[in-house]
Amino acid sequence: MAKQKVVLKLSMEDAQRRAKAMKCAVGLHGVVSASHDGDKLTVVGEGIDSVALTMLLRKKMGYVELLTITAIDEKN
């Protein structure tokens, strides 16, 4: 499977909500790293189920919008 980067938009007003979103994201199978920038959560991994990630975050956090899914080319 190829590595991919998933960018989601969700409301993260305080540190507690950011920590909750990050914990949900890194707990998913195949996730290598997760980072946030403002209201955007970027998840990088191999074989990530973006729909399952979005539904999990919607269940825990409320409104979540899936912005982009891009493949990452590994150049060795």
Image (cartoon, grey):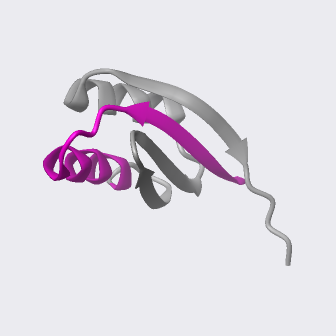
* Furthest residue toward bottom: 76
Image quarter where the C terminus lies is bottom right
Q: Quadrant of residue 59?
A: top left
Q: Residue furthest top?
A: 63
Residue shown at the point (62%, 49%) measured from the top left? 5
Magenta region includes residue 23: yes
Frontmost residue, 8 versus 14: 14
Q: Residue furthest right?
A: 75
- Residue 31 vs 17, above or below: the answer is below
Q: Is residue 63 left or right of residue 42?
A: left
Asked if 41 appears above or below 3 in the picture, the reply is above
Whether 76 is drawn above or below 8: the answer is below
Residue 32: where, in percent of width, then height?
49, 63
Could you tell whether 22 is left or right of 34 in the image?
Answer: left
The residue sitting at 44% across, 45% down in the picture is 41
**Residue 75 or residue 40, whichever sits in front:** 40
Question: Residue sitting at 54 percent across and 40 percent down?
Answer: 7
Q: Which residues are magenta?
A: 1-26
Foreground residue, 60 or 28? 60
Left or right for 65, reference 12: right
> x, y (%) of residue 13?
22, 39
Q: Quadrant of residue 73?
A: bottom right
Q: Position of residue 9 (x, y in %)?
A: 44, 32
State the image quarter where residue 74 is shown. Answer: bottom right
Residue at 18 percent across and 52 percent down: it is 15
Residue 66 percent across, percent down from the top left: 52, 27
Total labels: the figure holds: 0
